[in-house]
Amino acid sequence: MWTFVGRKRRKVWLWLAVERYIRRVVAWVLGTRGTATAPRLWRALPAEYHSGTWYYTDEWVAYRQVLPPAAHRPSPKGSGQTSIVEAVNCSLRQRCAVLVRRSCSFSRSLAMHRIRLLLCINDHNRRFTLH
């Protein structure tokens, strides 16, 4: 999911790792859509998610470079395997104005953008872990 920081031409991508069963965001990073951000997401994952886990992703090439091949499950669009992440994206968009598509709301600095997203993601995780 992409957002704006500073101005509309400065896109920043939000990468999420979501636990499918609980729908909890276990890791997230901001960066570009290129291959440099995928290793940062891998490093942000807690150690217990580095093995014994299947990783369902879209077919973006960046994931293949960091995820273990035996555990990586690239899924074509429309297969339903990444629908949990899309649902989390939708939920976050409803709660955080800077994530709304075609929004006039954007953060002026990357530091404030991170703080806004951290608050929103923490709130999301609280909602899904208390039920």
Image: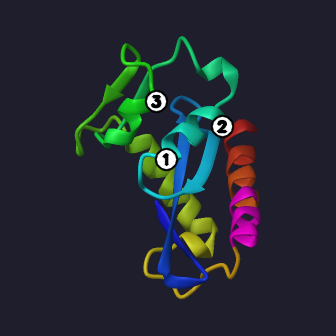
- In this rendering, the answer to whether 58 lies above or below 108 is above
Amino acid type for the residue under numbered disc 3: Val
Residue lying at 73% horizontally and 56% vertically, measured from the top left: 118
Which span of residues is magenta-colored? Answer: 110-118
Q: Nearer the viewer, residue 49 or 89?
A: 49
Mark 2 and mark 3: Cα distance apart in space? 12 Å
Tag shown at residue 44:
2
| Element type where label 1 sits in the image | loop
Mark 2 and mark 1: Cα distance apart in space? 14 Å
Q: Earlier in the sequence, mark 2 or mark 3?
A: 2
Q: Which residue is mark 1?
A: 36
Q: Earlier in the sequence, mark 1 or mark 3?
A: 1
Q: Are marks 2 and 3 in contact (CB under 8 Å)?
A: no
- In this rendering, the answer to whether 22 lies above or below 53 is below
Tag shown at residue 66:
3
- In this rendering, the answer to whether 46 lies above or below 107 is above
From the viewer's perspective, is 81 left or right of 13?
left
